[in-house]
Amino acid sequence: MSLQDFQRQLPLNEENMQSRAVYLLRLDPVLLGLLLLLTAGGLLMLYSASGQNLAMVTRQATYLAVGFVGMVIIANIPPRIFQRWSVWVYLIGVGLLVAVLVSGAGAKGAQRWLALPGFRFQPSEIMKLVMPMVVAWYLAKRVLPPRFKHLMVALGLILLPVSLIAKQPDLGTSLLIAASGLFVLFLAGLRWRIILGAVLAALPLAWGMWQFVMRDYQKQRVLTFLNPESDPWGSGWNIIQSKVAIGSGGIHGKGWFGGTQSQLDFLPESHTDFIIAVLAEEFGLVGVLLLLATYMAIIARGLIISVNAQTLFGKLLAGSITLTFFVYVFVNIGMVSGLLPVVGVPLPLVSRGGTSVVTLLAGFGVLMSVHSHRSWLGRG
Amino acid sequence: MAGHTPLKDHISESRIFNARLLFCFLGVAFLMGMLVVRMINLQVVQHAQWSTKSDENRIHLQPLPPTRGLIYDTNGEMLAENKPSYTLVLVKERITDLDASIELLRELLPITDEQVAKYKQQTRQSRPFEEVPLKYRLTEAEIARVAVNEHRLPGVEVLAQLVRFYPKGEMFAHTLGYVGSINERELSRLDVSLYSGTRTIGKIGIEKFYETELLGKAGYQEVETNARGRVLRVIHRKDPAPGSDITLYLDSELQQVVIDALGDRRGAVVAIDPKTGGILAMVSTPAYDPNLFVTGITSKDYNKLREDERRPLYNRASLGEYPPASTIKPMIAIAGLDTGVTNLEYTIFDPGWYQLPGEERRYRNWKRGGHGKVNLQWAVMLSNDTYFYDLALKLGIDNLHQYLSGFGLGRRVGLDVSEERPGLMPSREWKQGARGLPWYPGETLITGIGQGFMLATPLQLAASTAVIANRGHWIRPRLLKDSAPQIAASEKPPIDDVVLRQEGIWDFAIEAMRRVVHHPRGTAHYRIGRKLEYQFAGKTGTAQVVGIKQDEKYDAEKLSERNRDHGLFVGFAPVEDPRIAIAVVIENGGGGSSSAAPVARQVLDYYLLPRINDDNLVGEGKP
């Protein structure tokens, strides 16, 4: 409280002049507006995709409300708190992941959930936020570009939770979390020759993964992706039906509730991972371009925030969160449109699901925190 | 931040970071561009192709089977109808584990291995998402059990279907025939589009003969379905056209009288209206219930029918070939008079046998002591074999073949009887071809009494009798009386009339046959000739089943039942205005006069008495 009292006496910069209330809550009005636009549109799509199930939409709206409240709270935590506590939260997160592996309750054959009295949650969700923080925390203290020794430590920080999550097995999430850590490394100026070397080394490694590590269902997804027609009634069904939905939507779409693919249940997972196919079918290319523009605006805003951040920690953290968000968008849309394998990544802030919405909005809360605590840090 | 760590250069670090972020931004922009291109490709460039796929997904063409035409008897009584029946159907595309679903169904209701095998056979030729029946005729309780477990049985449904039903059961089994499941052989030759949605086809009888007309024309509907195949709405519908309703000449009441008269004897009766050729009754006993075949007969039931030594499946009326025996004597008499080899005055002396010149063998008259002096009229009346041995020899096999063929022997006579054997009217050519042997005169003799190679069906005998009643005019026997909508008549060619040199020959033949019944010494008089209210012309026949050795006496008591003679009778009435011609065959029934003739009398009494009374034709008959 005393901290906020102190802030109130500071002159406001012109960006935050627009709304005193928004400023007081340390929110970024541009980002907030874009997120509200996106989530509101998402609820409309969910209403159609769920077969006009108002209860489902209400539940999702509740999750969103919780997520926005969480976002506001996190936006009011100064970045240095994240910096200080991230390593501890990281260690707790790793501990929880181990606990999941030991005793996690199975869901769909995979052990992702940790059952606590009263509710269940996925420790991997915590990792999504903590991973960029802890790597940023570690690298921000070092000289950039990071030396080999520091690179190794950072990679260790990344791989420990990632391998635990991959063992659940949850390939999609583990790759996204790995990406969020690697983005920090990249933004920190990881040398190109190391990146190139890693890529060259990854090729035989990928072969080894395929041969010895990947589970059959994961291989099957890759094979089906390469030739979905080979198994049109099995694993290829999803991708074929989503392409039919998207393609048949045309430029203007079939109208809200008018999508035959989604309304007649030909499109599987239509309210979760494949919800963009519903949008593409019912609102056509116009709807898709509006959605992509919104995402692009959010990402652009995130990148601006990270450029303007005044600490290296803030820069790395904001940049990684924004880029990871983009990876979500790209992987999901790429998957649904048949460009990428089906890895089970939801369309961020639009697909149904409480946990991912709360985590994502928390991430935007971190972005806002980085942005709104700038002037204080600058003058301090 | 310990002192020995290198100093951080904030400006250089910012520069590095900003460069990396710019790189990332360009990457983001590039990948976003890729998504946009991908979406434009799907939604604009390939739009038409995906639109078509989307319609293919949701729109299915469903066949609508036509309602099969009904069959009525001459009085408008229903002989074949379609009754709703509840059928358990499976759509294999909607079932994840077929065997598990069938196992579950078996816990709920009795399903035989045979039904499962039949179902699996049918699914091999079914279209995607087609409902294929597993079990027919569900009871209310079974329907309820399936309904309660519906959630555990995706792809399983109870369908109300129209199933053929024959209310008269056994009565018309052989004549009407039945419908049954289309088998693979039938499938290969029929036009599949006509049978979309239809699972049965006429197998035998009228159901087979008029299959095309009874079937109707299939309709279809375009329906929108969801991913689980459930129909949500009908987009377009073309109604099926029902098959033609058919009215037959058959008379249920008369048919019942025939069946009652035959009792539990094996035999066949065909009754024809000589004026129209309409088949009034056609019975073969024993019979079977055609309803068993409609939804697939169990092999147990089928084997029982097939292995029954009374052969209920066998249609004796048009497939049964019997030696016509003495029933053909009036036709041979006509041939003798028309060719001039005999005349009304010519008389022979019958010692009880006939001998060919230079041969040992005696051809015996049925009456051991002989009939003494007989002329042609007496020969017919008494059924004297000796006279006909002599006459046959004089006619020769060529004349016999020509005349008797003219009466339809050895030919398929029916116009719309789907299963018919031609019988056998032997000739020199036939014997040379079939046996590779020349014709012997002795064979001419026994042909003269309707034995030997000669075979005829009850249908042929009834038809030839109708020709005599019509004084030579041929109308092929037919079952179809009328239909709505009208159907094309059978394309079978008419049979040429029998034209004689003198009309008087007909008068003679008919009078001779009248005497068989009415004359006190006529072979049929004792059994059926008394107290007749109409003039009845007829002829008995007794067909040997086993050869009786020379000088051996035929003793019915000693012969096993199966070796006893077949009893035959043909006739028509009233003589002056024939309304009905009939042929009766009783297998192993013994003499024709005692076994077959009384059946004919009962049938004709039933048929004619009310009609004669109506027409005030009473009193003309002499008792």
Image (tube, coloured by chain):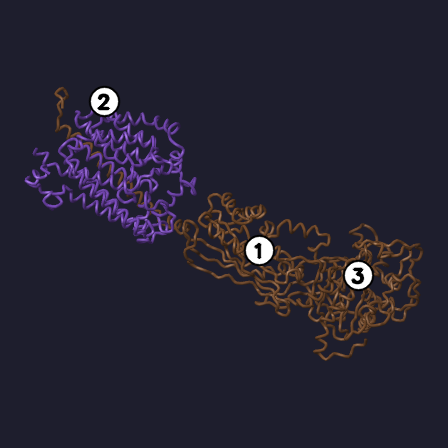
Number of the label disc, if any, that sits on residue B200: 1
Q: CA distance from mark 1 to mark 2?
A: 81 Å
Q: What residue sits right under mark 3 in the picture?
A: B567
Q: Is residue B220 above or below residue A65?
A: below
Question: Closer to the camera, A103 or B136?
Answer: A103
Q: CA distance from mark 1 to mark 3?
A: 39 Å
- Chain label for disc 3: B
- Chain label for disc 1: B
Q: Count the marks: how many?
A: 3
- The residue at the point 81 percent across, 77 percent down is B622
Name the mark nearer the viewer: 1 or 3.
Answer: 3
Left or right: residue A304 compared with residue B118 = left
Q: Colour of chain A?
A: purple
Q: Is residue A350 above or below residue B420?
A: above
Left or right: residue B226 compared with residue B299 = left
Q: Is residue A276 above or below residue B572?
A: above
In the rendered image, which quarter contains the N terminus of chain A? top left
Number of the label disc, if any, that sits on residue B566: none
Q: Colour of chain B?
A: brown
In this rendering, does residue B505 appear at all? no
Three-letter code for the amino acid on which mark 2 is drawn: Phe
Mark 1–mark 3 CB contact (< 8 Å): no
Three-letter code for the amino acid on which mark 3 is drawn: Gly
- The residue at the point 27 percent across, 33 percent down is A177
Three-letter code for the amino acid on which mark 1 is drawn: Thr
Residue B489 pos. (x, y %): 63, 65
Q: Residues within 10 Å of mark 2 (few under 14, many from 20)?
A: few
Mark 1–mark 2 CB contact (< 8 Å): no
Question: Closer to the camera, B278 or A180?
Answer: A180
Q: Is residue B118 above or below residue A326?
A: below
